[in-house]
Image (cartoon, rainbow, N blue to C red):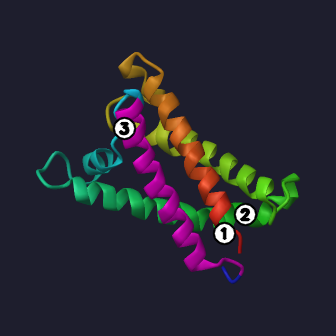
């Protein structure tokens, strides 16, 4: 069924993109003082609550989710990019495909599912600031760009 998917490359691309995304969140908080977005803490909240030592479980789940998203991109998005006019196996085409995927993931998973589940509301409305949503969008764009750049079977 998934014979056209390079499984290990998709898993590597998802892992690398998720890792860079988490690293980017720490960097943005440290360098620019933007809103704190700790994916280990976020994952910990929806997996096990506020138990001591569960940050590692949270970040592990973030990376597993990133691998699964990499596989979803490889199976359901990358093969159909030419259908919507985005060339594959070209630098800008692959990056654009990944960017679009990252924005869809941000909108569907982060803003409509994860943020409300963490008590922040849809698009983080409970925080009364757009900073968290904008930071999350930037990180998901980074995620998508790297995913598209690495996954070129």
Residue behind mark 2: 78
Which residue is rendered at x = 37% and y = 21% of the image? Answer: 126
Residue 141: tell me if it is visible: yes
What span is colored magenta in the figure?
A: 4-31
Q: Earlier in the sequence, mark 1 or mark 3?
A: 3
Q: What element carries label 2?
A: helix
- Residue 12 spot, x, y in % from top left: 52, 71
Left or right: residue 151 versus residue 129 is: right
92 and 63: which one is in front?
92
Main SS of residues in magenta: helix
Verify CB contact (< 8 Å) between mark 2 and mark 1.
yes
- Residue 35 spot, x, y in % from top left: 37, 28
Residue behind mark 3: 37
Which residue is rendered at x = 13% and y = 50% of the image? Answer: 51
Crowd band around label 2 with a 10 angstrom C-alpha radius: few (<14), some (14–19), many (20+): many
Q: Is mark 3 on a helix, strand or loop?
A: loop
């Amino acid at each position: 069924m998934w014979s056209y998917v390079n499984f290990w490359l998709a898993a590597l691309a998802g892992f690398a993109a998720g890792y860079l995304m988490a690293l980017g969140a720490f960097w943005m908080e440290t360098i620019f003082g933007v809103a704190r977005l700790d994916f280990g803490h976020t994952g910990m909240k929806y997996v096990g609550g506020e138990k001591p030592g569960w940050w590692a479980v949270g970040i592990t789940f973030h990376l597993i989710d990133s691998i699964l998203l990499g596989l979803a991109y490889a199976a359901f998005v990358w093969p159909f990019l030419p259908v919507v006019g985005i060339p594959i196996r070209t630098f800008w085409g692959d990056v654009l495909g990944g960017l679009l995927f990252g924005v869809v993931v941000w909108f569907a998973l982060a803003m409509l599912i994860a943020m409300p589940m963490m008590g922040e509301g849809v698009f983080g409305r409970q925080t009364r600031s757009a900073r968290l949503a904008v930071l999350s969008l930037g990180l998901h764009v980074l995620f998508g760009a790297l995913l598209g750049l690495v996954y070129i079977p």
